[in-house]
Structures are given as C-alpha cells and as structure tokens.
Image (cartoon, grey):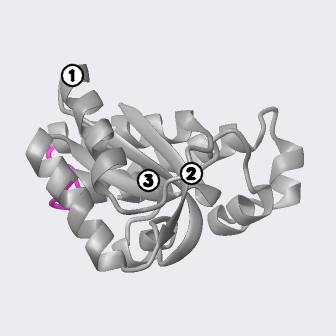
Amino acid sequence: MIVVEGAVTVDDLDTVLSELNAVAAAHDVTVQAFDARYVVDRRHLERAVELADRAFDRGENVARERSVEILLYAAGRRQIDDALEMGVSEGRLPVAVVVAATGDAPDRETAAADALRERLDLDIDPTATLDSTDDDRVRDFFDVTSAELDAVDGDLSDLIAERVALLDVKK
C-alpha cells in the first residue's frame, strides 16, 4: 500500500473521483481518497485495508467495491453515507490517497501513485498530511470522549485502531 499525501484544491469533486477511478482501472489497483484531517496515522489506513481485504476474502463485505469497503473500515461505520464525511470534498484540504493492489504488486502501486500525481489537476502541495492529527476533529468524528481516553492505556491512535476493528463486531 502506498499513501499519496498532499494539500489539494478540489474544484469539481465528480471530476476528481472520475480521475481516481481511471487511475485505479488503468493500473489494476484500488484508490481511495481521504480527508486527512480524519486520519490518525498510516497505521489507521493500513488496518482499514487489511480488514476490508479480510472481509472480501470471507465474503463478509458490506460494499461491492473494495475502495468503499476500505472507506467503511477507516471510518468505523457500516453506512456509506456516514463514512463519506471522511472522504474528499470540494475546497482546499489535506488528503491521503490510498493506492493498494491485491496481492504483492508494488510496481503497480508505484505506477498508479505516480499517475495520480501527474494526472490529477489538483495543485498538489506535497506536504506530509499524516504527520499531525486534528485530535478534536478525529475525536468528534469517532465519538471519543475525554473519559474514554483517560481510561485506556493507549493513545488516540490505539482507540481509533480499535474502532476500525470493531466494525466487524457491528456487522
């Protein structure tokens, strides 16, 4: 899995989504874009991909498309409409775009990531977006309370990893 990060300006969401889908199809990979303000760290996205793949392997997936299943796991939600808040929207925002092939295909992932950077007319500022977390936004989105944070041994990243994994229980 490769994560393409950057600050972008999205003027037309439909055009951007079409471009993401075209790159995915051309390179036989899955591409899912996230508003990076809702992502805790790289592990958050890796776990979402892992669990989405496991759901497909077991025939327990909720979504028909792998990219949507990854979004559902990353958001810790079963309803696509609820999970879409974590996706990209129009305007200027930090993004993290997951590029993931099935199996071991780093060449396809690299080619797709390069194509995303080249094809998308997105004014990509190559800023690392996963280096910092908007804790308040993440806590609000995942409904993490101060009491909950105080009661656990881990940190916010650990709690979000748990929320991602708990989607299986909610199914």
Q: Marks 3/2: CA distance?
A: 33 Å
Residue 62: in sight, yes or no? no
Provide residue 10's location: percent of width, then percent of height. 45, 72
- Dot 1 or dot 3: first in sequence order is 1
Q: Which mark is residue 5?
A: none
Residue type, label 1? Asp
Q: Residues within 10 Å of mark 2 (few under 14, many from 20)?
A: few
- Dot 1 or dot 2: first in sequence order is 1
Q: Tags 3 and 2 in contact by the CB under 8 Å rule?
A: no
Provide residue 4's location: percent of width, then percent of height. 44, 42
Residue type, label 2? Asp
Label 3 sits on a secondary structure element that is helix
Q: Quadrant of the N terminus?
A: top left
Q: Main secondary structure of the magenta part?
A: loop
Q: Tags 1 and 3 in contact by the CB under 8 Å rule?
A: no
Residue type, label 3? Leu
Residue toward you, 7 or 151:
7
